[in-house]
């Protein structure tokens, strides 16, 4: 069983910065691609940023130049650095990761999986 553990949300003033983390735990899980999504009250969940297995990145137009997605393969963790935050960035942020799951005993490949974190609140005050 793979869990994604999120941290780093909170309350910040407009113009401030936050860094979100998403760490895989539980079964042996090798993250291939990952992304951050957000959902504001009354709105649909939307893509914020993606990072692929070769570290290619893609961003929503609303966050380009302000947010940076990155990964630390040794820690099996994905980050979202958010700078110059705006009130419209207020939302619950979710991480998503896809990759290979390995049996913790034999360490043989078991399956491919896609997992979601529980979400973390980011509130930007004006």
Image (tube, rainbow, N blue to C red):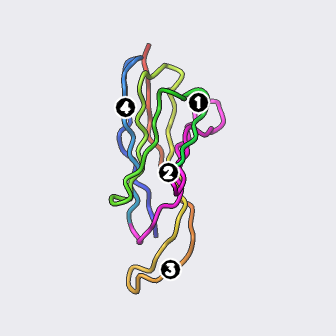
Q: CB atoms at circles 4 and 1 under 8 Å apart?
A: no
Q: Secondary structure at mark 4?
A: strand
Looking at the rendering, in which quadrant would you find the C terminus?
A: top left
Q: Which residue is mark 3?
A: 109
Q: CB atoms at circles 4 and 2 under 8 Å apart?
A: no
- Of badges 3 and 1, nearer the viewer stands 3
Q: Which numbered disc covers residue 41? A: 1
User: In the image, is residue 35 part of the stretch drawn in magenta?
Assistant: yes
Pick whichever of labels 1 and 2 is earlier in the sequence: 1
Compute the Cα span from label 4 to label 1: 20 Å
Pick whichever of labels 4 and 1 is earlier in the sequence: 4
Q: Is residue 51 above or below residue 92?
A: below
Compute the Cα span from label 3 to label 1: 39 Å
Q: Nearer the viewer, residue 18 or 126?
A: 18
Pick whichever of labels 3 and 2 is earlier in the sequence: 2
Compute the Cα span from label 3 to label 2: 23 Å
Pick whichever of labels 3 and 4 is earlier in the sequence: 4
Q: CB atoms at circles 3 and 1 under 8 Å apart?
A: no
Q: Which residue is mark 2?
A: 55
Q: Residues within 10 Å of mark 3 (few under 14, many from 20)?
A: few
Q: Is residue 74 above or below residue 111?
A: above
Q: Position of residue 54 (x, y in %)?
A: 52, 55
Q: Which numbered disc covers residue 18? A: 4
Residue range highlighted in magenta: 26-54
Q: Residues within 10 Å of mark 2 (few under 14, many from 20)?
A: some
Compute the Cα span from label 3 to label 4: 35 Å
- Of badges 3 and 2, nearer the viewer stands 2
- Of badges 3 and 4, nearer the viewer stands 3
């Amino acid at each position: 069983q793979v869990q994604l553990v999120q941290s780093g949300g909170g309350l910040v003033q407009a113009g401030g910065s936050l860094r979100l983390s998403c760490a895989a735990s539980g079964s042996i899980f090798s993250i291939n691609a990952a992304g951050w999504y957000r959902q504001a009250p009354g709105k649909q969940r939307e893509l914020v940023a993606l990072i692929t297995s070769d570290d290619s990145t893609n961003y929503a137009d609303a966050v380009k130049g302000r947010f940076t997605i990155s990964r630390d393969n040794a820690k099996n963790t994905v980050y979202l650095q958010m700078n110059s935050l705006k009130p419209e960035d207020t939302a619950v942020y979710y991480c998503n990761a896809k990759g290979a799951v390995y049996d913790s005993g034999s360490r043989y490949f078991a399956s491919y999986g896609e997992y979601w974190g529980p979400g973390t609140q980011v509130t930007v005050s004006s």
